[in-house]
Image: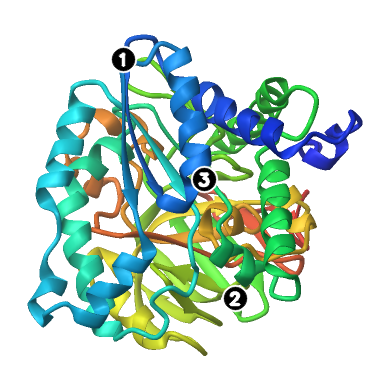
Amino acid sequence: MMNPPSPQTETAAPRLDFETQIDRLAQAAVHCGLGLAPGQELVMTAGIEALPLARRITEHAYRAGATLVTTFYGDEASALLRYQHGSDSSFDAAAGWLYEGMAAAYKNGAARLAIAGGDPALLAQQDPEKVSRANRANSRAYRPALELITRHDINWTIVAAATPAWARAVFPELEPEAALARLWAAIFAASRVDGPDPVAAWKRHDAGLHARADRLNARRFASLHFRGPGTDLKVGLADDHVWLGGGMQAHNGRYCIPNIPTEEVFTTPHKNRVEGVVASTKPLSHMGTMIEEIAVRFEGGKIVEARAARGESVLRRLLETDDGAARLGEVALVPHSSPISAGGRLFLNTLFDENAACHIALGQAYATCVRGGDQLSQEELAARGANESLIHVDWMIGSGRMDVDGITASGAAEPLLRQGEWV
């Protein structure tokens, strides 16, 4: 199958102004990403610097028939004040009452939308132990709401908004105003809203991802074998695993595309059947800290050796979150020629960077990537190999030098990607 058309190939129309494109991104978020239903509530989270996009999304949600849009805004400067002035005990606290309220809203039928985008190195100078404790406390408190999302009980999506700090990190060579404009342009292109018909573009792209996932499901591979610089990794796949890509129908009946942008097809590894070594090919920006040149070794599905050139202490604390944090919950295939990779720019944001390269995720598996998984208990999912954890952290292992084979139950190898491209 040919690679999906890049956003750049669909921009024959006159260049669109910023206001038109941000409005189109809001429409895509509501209609393509969320598939918001008339009469449905929406719970949204965003940084205060994403206010212009959040307001546009709110407008289009109400135009689509939303009964209520409730937005929770975060502030990075306030987050830093906690590390500068908060008591030591504060790093073991989280707003459980807030997440309980979110979970209640989802159980009552609300949709979920997150606007990503912030300073990739916000917490780089802070105590890694405090960062780890705060993340662990937050993950525990958020778990009841997160389970409803990972089981796709509700329709949900994530989109991005450019911010000055993020733009400076991605385009350090540009003046601040030019960097912000360039980042917005990159977001619009990757999100397929800079062409003449974004909705049609998303329908074509979504169909292409589904076709790729269907072909992988038809093959029923037992495992994947990744080979590249620093990588010789065999990833066993969960029993009754299912490949997914693009959008899906949530259990409330709404069709949604969870990530805008998305270029991946993905499934659930078996938590006990991962062996070998793997090296990251792009830095990981995790909760305001940077982790670079990750190299780990798996035995029996678990990471037994881990190092990183930068941020190793943060990586180690991440792996210590719980037993499942050192095991895989997702494996995804992305061609090296994906539009985001072809742009040649590291976004320092997983929503984008994971769609530039094959990747794996530490931690929680998606129940929907196991056949009938939404109807299974945690014990039944575990019996099929699905991992359980408080975290779900993607990091990139693919490149133009990566080969991937599908391994059948009989042990035969079939080429899937060569030099990062679909065979």
As shown in the figure, which amino acid type bears the numbered disc 2? Answer: Thr
Does the rendering let one see residue 336? no
Seen at 38% across and 9% down, the residue is: 38
Figure label count: 3
Mark number displayed over residue 266: 3
Query: Toward the viewer: 352 or 41?
Result: 41
Measured as percent of width and height from the top left, residue 320 is found at: 24, 76
Tell me the SS state at disc 2: strand
Q: Earlier in the sequence, mark 3 or mark 1?
A: 1
Q: Earlier in the sequence, mark 3 or mark 2?
A: 2
Tell me how far mark 2 sits from mark 1, CA to CA.
50 Å
Q: Which residue is mark 1?
A: 67
Q: Quick check: 400 above or below 103?
A: below
Q: Quick check: 155 above or below 124?
A: above
Nearer mark to the viewer, of 3 and 2: 3
Tell me how far mark 3 sits from mark 1, CA to CA.
34 Å
Mark 1, residues whose alpha carbon is within 10 Å: few (<14), some, or many (≥20)?
some
Q: Which residue is mark 2?
A: 231
